[in-house]
Image (tube, helix red, strand yellow):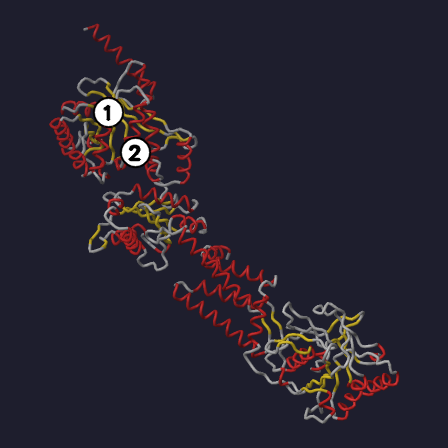
């Protein structure tokens, strides 16, 4: 489950949706969206015209006293109460303060009239201070409230003077007074607040003045609950949607009408955010294409609009700014991300996301997830771009990217602005990942048509599927693999983990190798080379040697391949060259000046870095460059002979000589021999080992030696392990040989001692002669 949640979190849209939901909840809890809520509720009040029940009527009494806290004339009140009783009013609620008139007889008559009505007369009391008027509201004199039923006429307004909810009771001293609307609605012991439904038309509430009532107006009060309200200074007014300021009595009347309908419920932001938030998240999680998501967004917004209309029709109040906040905040997050992507994480020329975006996206992927990081290196891109406008350059890149995403609609192709494209593939989806990529490369390498021109596409592919490394490291590894891949030799180069390919890519080995390189623990041994005609040691081949602290000797074939795959081959070559030339300088101090050979991979001749390396090391030592031989290995991997020839010629100007290693193993060796200025041919040990038993091997060796002699090259045989092979090569005219029969690889001290013994023996022989 946790893994699934992490996978969902890795999707940017879902991550933004989660942030939007959380922020909307926080903003809603802090009532930051309340002005928008008020706007929605005001809009809802205009959607329907609901008629009141007609069971509640409003009669207002005009006041002749305009002083603060003044009351209506007691006589007018007595006459109105008597008239209402005579007309059969069910109940009378007096929604204004009653004060003594100063005339004891009149006050006594008013009290007797109220008591005579019994439970049908209800007085009101204002518990709270009127914050809008910044003054205490006048209260009914206790003389009149004694033995009478009293309710609260309180309400709360928002900052715009609107009343959106009325509590069912208000605390007064040690008791609770029921709210006036509960009496009007006959709700009894009501426990929940009511949200007045302002779609109930206040103008349709039966209403009139006390004067009109006394004069025989047509207002019908029989069987109705009548609210007696006041006009002038005793009356309090509030604002309701569509009506503006009205007497506060109407708020309780509308609240009662709402309660009679069984509506008026309030649902806070948590309900709406939970419902619409979950729906929004699921929408994003299930809809994969942009078009479907846009349809989903539209339907989701329509659902909010529909819910607003339904809530208005049902007379319930819901805070919808939570879902709307989700939409707005999500839009802001997506806009910011897209803006950032366009300006900071989009390569402007191609319009493709760059490697900054890829590192961001990969950083959200879970370590150990079985995905392959694929890097594609476009060859000769600079030369192609030199002939194209910037617009055509972008189209060229987008066409290639479109081919690389073939079959994967949601595939994102990244471009680093140079020569590299990259993307991610799920390994589990492909039984043969390398085969799939080879086929994809074949498709992507088809020529691109631009501006009525067909342009070639050449590329190599590097793949990292080592699951435990950090994603950024895996991207670098894939790029290094693409650099090491060769169009003719190995166009798709896959770096796998230890479980898939323990012999070629061992994480433990890689970690130890990195330590060995950084701590300079890879050394050399020198295998002597002898003049086969005289038997004299004339030189040595420098061989890389690594003795691991825990695992002992590590095969050069293994750790050199590891260096190549990890992009550390130049580093290894630099260290071996430095140690070799230091060894040659040490031999020179001992009075010896043999030729020394070092091995350099053919793939390092793609540019002038190897020339820089050789020149820097030669400049730092006293070795004669003519005594240095560079053995070029795996010449079949040379792609561009023109570039390689430039590098050969630059190094050759210093006097350094070149040897073609393992000659005869790969067919491209003959191409390399004819294209590049070699000085030596080194016969592969596979032929030397079979010379005594195979006429074919003996003929090959013989012909290679003759080829060397006819072209002015030095012939060198490796792998001489017995006297018979030594004599056979000598008879065939081979110039130089090496192998265990001549000497095993030696340390610098051992080679110096061997050369010293050879020199001393020569002196003795000359004396004897």
User: Is residue 102 left or right of 14 when viewed as pictured?
Assistant: right
Q: Residues within 10 Å of mark 1 (few under 14, many from 20)?
A: some
Q: Look at the picture and state if 415 lies above or below 585.
A: below
Q: Nearer the viewer, residue 16 or 571?
A: 16
Question: Is disc 2 placed on a helix, strand or loop?
Answer: helix
Q: How many marks?
A: 2
As drawn, the label of residue 168 is: none
Distance from disc 2 to disc 1, alpha carbons, whole Å, reads: 16 Å
Q: Residue at x 45, y 71 (%)?
A: 299
> Callout 2: 10 Å neighbours few (<14), some, many (20+)?
few
Q: Is residue 329 left or right of residue 241?
A: left
Image coordinates of residue 195 in percent, x first then y, are: 64, 75
Q: Using the image as rendered, state which of residue 254 and residue 538 is in the foreground.
A: 254
Picture quadrant of residue 504? top left
Residue 605 in view (yes/no) = yes
Q: Is residue 491 visible?
A: no
Of all residues shown, which one is farthest toward the right? 104
Q: What residue is pinned by disc 1? A: 654
Q: Position of residue 85 (x, y in %)?
A: 77, 91
Q: What residue is disc 2 on?
A: 609
Name the spot of residue 602 as percent of width and height, x first: 25, 35
Tell whether label 1 touches label 2 (CB within 8 Å). Answer: no
Query: Which part of the image, by quadrant, shows the C terminus?
Result: top left
As drawn, 272 above or below 587: below
Q: Secondary structure at mark 1?
A: loop
Residue 353, position in %: x, y?
37, 52
Which of the two residues, 669 or 360, is positioned nearer the viewer here? 360
Mark earlier in primary sequence (2, 1): 2
Whether 541 is drawn above or below 187: the answer is above
Between residues 638 and 532, which one lies in front from this camera angle? 638
């Amino acid at each position: 489950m946790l893994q699934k949640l992490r996978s969902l979190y890795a999707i940017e849209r879902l991550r933004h949706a989660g942030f939007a939901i959380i922020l909307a909840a926080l903003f809603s809890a802090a009532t930051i969206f309340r002005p928008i809520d008020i706007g929605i509720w005001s809009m809802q009040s205009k959607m329907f015209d609901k008629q009141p029940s007609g069971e509640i009527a409003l009669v207002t009494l005009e006041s002749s006293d305009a002083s603060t806290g003044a009351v209506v004339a007691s006589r007018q009140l007595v006459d109105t109460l008597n008239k209402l009783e005579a007309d059969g009013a069910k109940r009378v609620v007096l929604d204004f303060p009653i004060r003594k008139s100063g005339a004891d007889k009149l006050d006594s008559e008013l009290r007797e009239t109220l008591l005579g009505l019994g439970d049908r007369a209800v007085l009101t009391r204002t518990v709270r201070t009127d914050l809008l008027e910044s003054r205490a509201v006048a209260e009914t004199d206790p003389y009149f409230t004694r033995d009478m039923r009293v309710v609260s006429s309180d309400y709360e307004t928002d900052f715009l003077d609107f009343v959106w909810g009325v509590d069912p009771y208000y605390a007064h001293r040690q008791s609770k007074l029921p709210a006036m609307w509960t009496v009007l609605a006959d709700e009894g012991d009501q426990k929940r607040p009511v949200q007045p439904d302002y779609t109930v038309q206040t103008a349709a509430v039966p209403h009139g003045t006390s004067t009109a009532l006394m004069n025989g107006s047509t207002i019908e009060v029989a069987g109705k609950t009548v609210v007696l309200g006041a006009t002038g200074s005793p009356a309090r007014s509030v604002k309701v949607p569509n009506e503006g300021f009205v007497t506060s009595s109407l708020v309780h009347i509308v609240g009662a009408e709402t309660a009679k309908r069984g509506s008026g419920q309030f649902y806070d932001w948590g309900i709406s955010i939970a419902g619409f938030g979950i729906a929004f998240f699921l929408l994003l999680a299930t809809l994969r294409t942009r078009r479907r998501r846009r349809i989903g967004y539209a339907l989701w917004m329509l659902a909010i609009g529909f819910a607003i209309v339904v809530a208005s029709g049902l007379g319930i109040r819901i805070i919808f700014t939570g879902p709307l906040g989700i939409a707005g905040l999500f839009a802001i997050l997506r806009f910011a991300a897209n803006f950032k992507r366009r300006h900071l994480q989009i390569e402007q020329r191609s319009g493709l996301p760059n490697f900054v975006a890829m590192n961001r996206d990969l950083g959200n992927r879970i370590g150990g997830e079985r995905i392959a990081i694929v890097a594609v290196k476009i060859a000769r891109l600079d030369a192609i771009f030199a002939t194209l406008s910037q617009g055509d350059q972008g189209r060229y890149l987008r066409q290639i990217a479109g081919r690389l995403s073939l079959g994967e609609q949601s595939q994102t192709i990244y471009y680093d602005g140079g020569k590299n494209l990259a993307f991610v593939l799920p390994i589990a989806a492909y039984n043969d990942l390398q085969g799939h990529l080879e086929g994809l490369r074949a498709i992507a390498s088809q020529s691109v048509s631009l501006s009525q021109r067909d342009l070639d596409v050449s590329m190599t592919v590097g793949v990292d599927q080592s699951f435990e490394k950090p994603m950024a490291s895996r991207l670098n590894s894939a790029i290094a693999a693409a650099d090491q891949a060769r169009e003719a030799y190995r166009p798709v180069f896959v770096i796998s983990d230890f479980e898939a390919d323990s012999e070629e890519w061992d994480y433990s080995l890689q970690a130890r190798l990195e330590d060995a390189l950084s701590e300079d623990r890879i050394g050399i041994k020198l295998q002597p080379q002898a003049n086969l005609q005289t038997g004299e040691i004339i030189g040595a081949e420098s061989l890389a040697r690594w003795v691991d602290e825990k695992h002992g000797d590590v095969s050069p074939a293994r750790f050199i391949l590891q260096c190549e795959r990890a992009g550390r081959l130049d580093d290894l070559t630099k260290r071996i060259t430095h140690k070799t030339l230091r060894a040659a300088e040490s031999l020179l101090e001992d009075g010896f000046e043999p030729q020394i050979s070092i091995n350099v991979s053919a793939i390092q001749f793609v540019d002038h870095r190897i020339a820089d390396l050789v020149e820097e090391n030669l400049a730092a030592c006293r070795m004669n460059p003519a005594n240095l031989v560079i053995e070029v290995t795996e010449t079949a991997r040379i792609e561009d002979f023109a570039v390689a020839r430039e590098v050969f010629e630059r190094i050759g100007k210093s006097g350094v000589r070149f040897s073609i290693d393992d000659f005869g193993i790969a067919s491209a060796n003959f191409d390399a021999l004819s294209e590049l200025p070699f000085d030596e041919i080194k016969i592969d040990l596979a032929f030397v080992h079979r010379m005594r038993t195979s006429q074919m091997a003996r003929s090959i060796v013989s012909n290679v030696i003759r080829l060397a002699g006819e072209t002015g090259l030095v012939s060198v045989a490796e792998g001489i392990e017995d006297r018979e092979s030594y004599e056979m090569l000598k008879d065939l005219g081979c110039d130089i040989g090496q192998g265990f029969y001549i000497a095993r690889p030696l340390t610098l001290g051992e080679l110096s001692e061997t050369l010293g013994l050879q020199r001393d023996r020569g002196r003795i022989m000359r004396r004897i002669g």
